[in-house]
C-alpha cells in the first residue's frame, strides 16, 4: 500500500509572489521528490474559434481554465501515473500541440491565481496557501513583467489591469482567500510564514513516511 503524494495549492493575485513562494518551498525540499503544476498551462484549447475571438479571451476568469483536464492530471499523479502537461501558445491564444512529460512525485505543488476557486481542486489539497500582496505592489510587478518579458506598452498593461485584472481579482480571486489554510502576506519575502509552511509540509511527509 503506497502513500498518496502531498498536494499543496498556492493561490493569489497576479504579481502577488506565488511563484516566489513556490520556488522557496521547492528549494527547501530540493532533495525531495517535488513537481510543480502551473494552472496557467491549463487554459482551454481555443483552436475552434476564429483568431479575432481568441483575442477577447479573459485569462483571469475561472471559465478560461480547463479544470477538468487539470483535475484528471492531478488524479493520475496521485496514482503515480505520468502525465503530458499541456503547453499554452500565447501568441495564437490557444493550446499548443506540444506537451511536457511529467513524472509523478511525492509532493505536488499546484500554483495559479484561481487554484482555490474550484471545490474539486481544493478537495485534493493537503495544504492550501493564499499569497496576499497589496494591489499597488502587484500592478507594479505585472507592469515590469509584461513590458520587459512580453513587449507590451505601459498603456496596454494599465488598461488591461483596470478593465480586466482588477475586477476579476475582486470578483473571483480575493474571495478564495477564505479557503486558505495559511495566508502569506507579501509573498516570497515573508520568510517566517514560509518557514511555518515548510515545517507543516515536513510533518505531513513524515506522517506519510516519505522522510
Image (cartoon, rainbow, N blue to C red):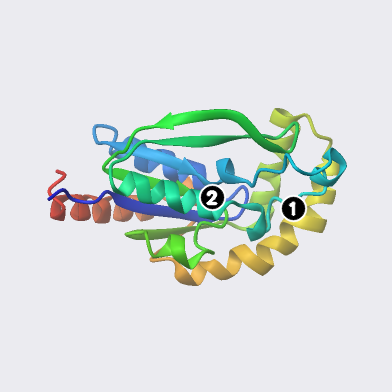
- Mark nearest the camera among 2 and 1 is 1
Q: Is residue 125 above or below residue 98?
A: below
Q: Residue at x 48, y 29 (%)?
A: 100
According to the picture, the residue beneath numbered tag 2 turns out to be 112
Q: Is residue 26 above or below residue 67?
A: above
Residue nearer the viewer, 34 or 55: 55
Tell me the quarter of the picture where residue 180 sits. bottom left
Q: Which element is circle 2 on? A: loop
Seen as rendered, the residue at the extreme front is 48
Query: What numbered label is drawn on residue 58?
Result: 1
Lower sequence index among marks 2 and 1: 1
User: Whole-Å distance between the Cαs marked 2 and 1?
Assistant: 15 Å
Q: Residue at x 64, y 31 (%)?
A: 96
Structural crowding at the residue carrying mark 1, measured as other residues with C-alpha within 10 Å and reported as few (<14), some (14–19) or many (≥20): some
Left or right of 32, for residue 155? right
Q: Nearer the viewer, residue 81 or 198?
A: 81
* Label 1: element kind: loop
In the image, taking residue 101 as reference, residue 13 lies left or right, namely: right
Residue 52 seen in this snapshot: yes
Residue 155 visible = no
Please give the name of the residue rendered at 43% of the width and 29% of the height, measured from the top-left corner. Answer: 101
Q: Which quadrant is the C terminus positioned in?
A: top left
Q: Residues within 10 Å of mark 2 (few under 14, many from 20)?
A: many
**Residue 78: horizontal and vertical position, in percent?**
31, 49
Amino acid at each position: 500500500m503506497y502513500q498518496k503524494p502531498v498536494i499543496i495549492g498556492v493561490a493569489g493575485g497576479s504579481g502577488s509572489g506565488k511563484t516566489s513562494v513556490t520556488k522557496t518551498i521547492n528549494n527547501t525540499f530540493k532533495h525531495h521528490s517535488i513537481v510543480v503544476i502551473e494552472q496557467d498551462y491549463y487554459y482551454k484549447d481555443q483552436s475552434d474559434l476564429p483568431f479575432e475571438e481568441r483575442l477577447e479571451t479573459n485569462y483571469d476568469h475561472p471559465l478560461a481554465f480547463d479544470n477538468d483536464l487539470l483535475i484528471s492530471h492531478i488524479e493520475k499523479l496521485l496514482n503515480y501515473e505520468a502525465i503530458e502537461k499541456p503547453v499554452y501558445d500565447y501568441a495564437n491564444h490557444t493550446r499548443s500541440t506540444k506537451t511536457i512529460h511529467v513524472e509523478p512525485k511525492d509532493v505536488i505543488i499546484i500554483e495559479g491565481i484561481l487554484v482555490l476557486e474550484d471545490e474539486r481542486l481544493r478537495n485534493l489539497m493537503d495544504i492550501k496557501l493564499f499569497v496576499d500582496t497589496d494591489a499597488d505592489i502587484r500592478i507594479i510587478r505585472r507592469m515590469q513583467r509584461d513590458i520587459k518579458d512580453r513587449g507590451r506598452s505601459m498603456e496596454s498593461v494599465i488598461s488591461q489591469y483596470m478593465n480586466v485584472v482588477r475586477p476579476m481579482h475582486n470578483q473571483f480571486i480575493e474571495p478564495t482567500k477564505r479557503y486558505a489554510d495559511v495566508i502569506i502576506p507579501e509573498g516570497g519575502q515573508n520568510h517566517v510564514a514560509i518557514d511555518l509552511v515548510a515545517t507543516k509540509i515536513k510533518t505531513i511527509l513524515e506522517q506519510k513516511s516519505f522522510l
